[in-house]
Image (cartoon, rainbow, N blue to C red):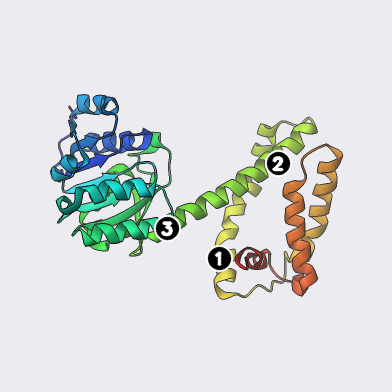
């Protein structure tokens, strides 16, 4: 049993007990909430039952015990099917859908839940399972603002940095995808650079330490780039696209000479060279957003 007392304890159903769902249920139990769990394979529920959770035989049974229904399963279509099966049992409750999927699926599930008489929030979890319940765990939420405000303390139990971003449940999905998009770009760049340094016999850890101020400064550029993109004003007196080309040529030449894959820097060089040819050589790097948005 959880040893925490919570004067604001809520009855919560957690549908889906994979790695993330189990972490969510654990955080809620540790927060003193009354938790009912359901999973297709009941063996995953045993550790949670030992901590004080109640095991439901069906999703509908779990929903019937709860004020708040949290769903974390594999895919938005699966989540929608579970909620649809609960039908009228959802009436008057709040559904917090923490399932990954497309923005359109989150909107469709939100419409379904609303038509069944429940409030709907879609949450996009921006952390790994072991960090669930920590004060720094970020979860973006969209949907019914009234539900977010009512259950904000509960939502902060699973992620201390719970943030309402839009009444449109698709927005947190898109925010999550955007963070991952940036993450993969940064990671790929770091790994390419690490391969280059490694071939030169240099230690990556030492580089990371010495270059930390420069690497940390990269994220400080995002607000400036965002302002330029939102205003569509790209002209800049410094750091213009034309000044990127020589450095890209050097990187390509060095990579080729050391037998490092050149696809990533070659792709970037092509973007920059194409923009310069189109007459944008004096513009900021943010001008390249047009390449990605024109498809």
In percent of width and height, residue 153 lies at 24, 49
**Label 3 neighbour load within 10 Å: few <14, some 14-19, many 20+:** some
Residue to which mark 1 is pinned: 226
Residue to which mark 3 is pinned: 103
> Which of labels 3 and 1 is toward the front?
3
In percent of width and height, residue 198 lies at 75, 32
Q: Is residue 29 left or right of residue 203?
A: left
In percent of width and height, residue 226 lies at 55, 65
Q: Residue at x 28, y 24 (%)?
A: 43
Looking at marks 1 and 2 on the same chain, the residue that comes earlier in the sequence is marked by 2
Q: Are marks 3 and 1 in contact (CB under 8 Å)?
A: no
Q: Is residue 157 left or right of residue 11?
A: right
Looking at marks 2 and 3 on the same chain, the residue that comes earlier in the sequence is marked by 3
Q: Residue at x 72, y 64 (%)?
A: 239
Provide the secondary structure element on which disc 3 rests: helix
Residue 160 seen in the figure:
no
Provide the secondary structure element on which disc 2 rests: helix
Question: Residue 173 appears in which quarter of the rendering?
Answer: bottom left
**Label 1 neighbour load within 10 Å: few <14, some 14-19, many 20+:** few
3D distance between C-alphas at marks 1 and 2 = 26 Å
Looking at marks 3 and 1 on the same chain, the residue that comes earlier in the sequence is marked by 3
Q: How many marks?
A: 3
**Label 2 neighbour load within 10 Å: few <14, some 14-19, many 20+:** some
- Residue 192 - label: 2
In percent of width and height, residue 74 lies at 38, 41
Q: Residue at x 29, y 45 (%)?
A: 71
State the residue in front, 212 or 51. Answer: 51
3D distance between C-alphas at marks 3 and 1 = 22 Å
Residue 205 seen in the figure:
yes
Provide the secondary structure element on which disc 1 rests: helix
Q: Are marks 1 and 2 in contact (CB under 8 Å)?
A: no
């Amino acid at each position: 049993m959880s040893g925490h007392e919570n004067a604001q304890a809520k009855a919560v159903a957690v549908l889906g007990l994979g790695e993330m769902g189990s972490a969510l249920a654990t955080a809620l139990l540790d927060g003193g909430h009354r938790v009912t769990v359901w999973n297709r394979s009941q063996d995953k529920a045993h550790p949670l039952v030992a901590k004080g959770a109640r095991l439901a035989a069906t999703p509908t049974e779990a929903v019937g015990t709860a004020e708040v229904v949290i769903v974390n399963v594999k895919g938005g279509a699966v989540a929608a099917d579970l909620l649809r099966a609960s039908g009228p049992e959802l009436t008057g409750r709040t559904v917090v859908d923490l399932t990954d999927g497309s923005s359109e699926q989150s909107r469709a599930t939100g419409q379904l839940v609303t038509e069944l008489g429940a409030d709907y929030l879609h949450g996009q979890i921006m952390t790994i399972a072991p960090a669930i319940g920590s004060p720094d765990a970020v979860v973006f939420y969209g949907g019914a603002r009234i539900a977010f405000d009512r259950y904000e303390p509960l939502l902060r139990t699973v992620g201390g940095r719970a943030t309402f971003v839009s009444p449109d449940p698709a927005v947190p999905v898109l925010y999550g995808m955007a963070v991952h998009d940036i993450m993969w770009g940064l990671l790929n760049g770091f790994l390419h650079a690490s391969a280059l340094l490694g071939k030169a016999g240099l230690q990556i850890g030492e580089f990371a330490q010495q270059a930390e101020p420069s690497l940390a400064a990269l994220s400080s550029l995002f607000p400036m780039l965002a302002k330029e993109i939102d205003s569509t004003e790209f002209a800049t007196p410094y750091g213009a696209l034309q000044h990127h080309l020589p450095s890209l040529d050097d990187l390509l030449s060095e990579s080729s000479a050391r037998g490092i894959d050149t696809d990533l820097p070659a792709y970037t060089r092509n973007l920059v060279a194409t923009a310069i040819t189109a007459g944008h050589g004096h513009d900021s790097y943010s001008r390249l957003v047009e390449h990605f948005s024109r498809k």
